[in-house]
Image: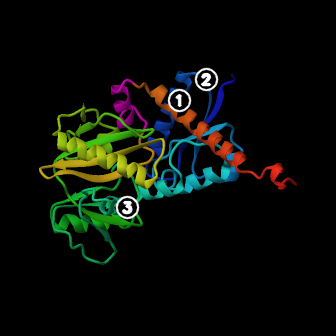
């Protein structure tokens, strides 16, 4: 059997471009380590379906983060390209990227999530302090500001309104940060994140080496069940596929859903690779499985299409 040719896309126009390039390089190396793949790395800004058709590969592994690469637009082009690709389809990608939309899914399903408001320019925020001001469509804690005073809220809004098109305010839950990865519908081990800094911001995620990660942290059975049930439900309800990561805060009331990432980071600091390794799944196996899953999904779709075509026996042949 010949090796599978895989196009690993990375980069993008969003704030997480550098992280995407680091993630993409790790995915490319993991596929080489897995064996059975010919890997083509491609750094892009934006790419149309026509651009993609000029790039090699039997399957595509997009490792982009942010509104364009993870939030639907690139997925639309991947659908038009027609090759099998890893990750969620456009609708699920859009909902996952939109923090307000994913919270609506959670709230409608009875999943506990902090109160939140859209912040429209010039309008006051009626959420009681403390709050978090954040972009609705960005990841890696880009632009996240914790605010304990009205002055801090005003400063955060002044800073962020010129950089991001849509902002939201969310009630600040102070407690333990728990994250859980989903690999092919199976939950990976929980991770508790304990940053040395004030909170788990961009630097703590990718630049600092003093953040502590506790695998399989001690949690009450009730909280474990709450997080597991919410994670599985939201992953399925939103329509994610292949891989995702969900973030929660845990306080005295229980677990609070914060957000879902449909293409989580894949760097050496990232949480899904750590959780998979703890579960005994090497990163090379994770990446290889995802490519094979995408190809198998495409083959299954083609088989279903062929089986539904009109039969000559029914007089439908042309």
- Disc 2 designates what residue? 36
* Sequence-first disc among 1 and 2: 2
In the image, taking residue 84 as reference, residue 108 lies left or right, namely left
| Highlighted magenta segment, given as a residue range | 266-280
The answer to whether the residue labelled 1 contacts the one labelled 2, judged by CB atoms less than 8 Å apart, is yes
Picture disc at residue 288 = 1
Front: mark 3 or 1? 1
* Place of residue 72 in the rendered image (x, y in percent of width and height, measured from the top left): 52, 56
Question: Element type at marker 2?
Answer: loop
Question: Element type at marker 1?
Answer: helix
- Disc 3 designates what residue? 136
In the image, taking residue 124 as reference, residue 233 lies left or right, namely right
Residue at horizontal 88%, vertical 54%? 318
For this rendering, which residue is in front, 70 or 140? 70
Residue at horizontal 15%, vertical 40%? 220
Where is residue 151, by image quadrant?
bottom left
């Amino acid at each position: 059997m010949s090796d599978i040719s895989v196009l690993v896309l990375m980069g993008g126009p969003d704030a997480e471009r550098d992280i995407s390039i680091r993630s993409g390089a790790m995915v490319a190396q993991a596929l080489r380590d897995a064996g059975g793949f010919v890997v083509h790395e491609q750094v892009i800004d934006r790419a149309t379906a026509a651009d993609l058709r000029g790039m090699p590969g039997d399957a595509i592994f997009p490792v982009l983060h942010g509104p364009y690469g993870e939030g639907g637009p690139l997925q639309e082009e991947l659908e038009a390209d027609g090759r099998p690709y890893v990750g969620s389809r456009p609708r699920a990608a859009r909902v996952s990227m939109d923090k307000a939309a994913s919270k609506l899914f959670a709230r409608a399903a009875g999943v506990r999530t902090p109160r939140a408001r859209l912040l429209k320019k010039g309008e006051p925020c009626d959420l009681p302090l403390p709050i978090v001001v954040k972009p609705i469509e960005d990841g890696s804690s880009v632009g996240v500001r914790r605010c304990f005073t009205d002055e801090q809220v005003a400063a955060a809004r002044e800073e962020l309104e010129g950089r991001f098109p849509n902002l939201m305010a969310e009630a600040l839950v102070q407690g333990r940060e728990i994250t859980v990865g989903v690999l092919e519908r199976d939950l990976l081990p929980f991770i508790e994140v304990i940053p040395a800094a004030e909170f788990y911001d961009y630097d703590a995620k990718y630049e600092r080496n003093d953040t502590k990660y506790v695998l399989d942290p001690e949690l009450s059975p009730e909280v474990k069940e709450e997080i597991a049930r919410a994670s599985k439900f939201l992953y399925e309800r939103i329509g994610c596929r292949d891989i995702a990561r969900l973030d929660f805060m845990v306080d005295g009331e229980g677990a609070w859903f914060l957000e879902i990432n449909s293409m989580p980071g894949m760097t050496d600091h990232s949480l899904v690779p750590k959780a998979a390794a703890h579960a005994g799944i090497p990163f090379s196996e994770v990446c290889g499985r995802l490519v094979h899953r995408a190809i198998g999904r495409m083959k299954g779709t083609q088989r279903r299409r062929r089986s539904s075509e009109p039969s000559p026996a029914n007089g439908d042949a042309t």
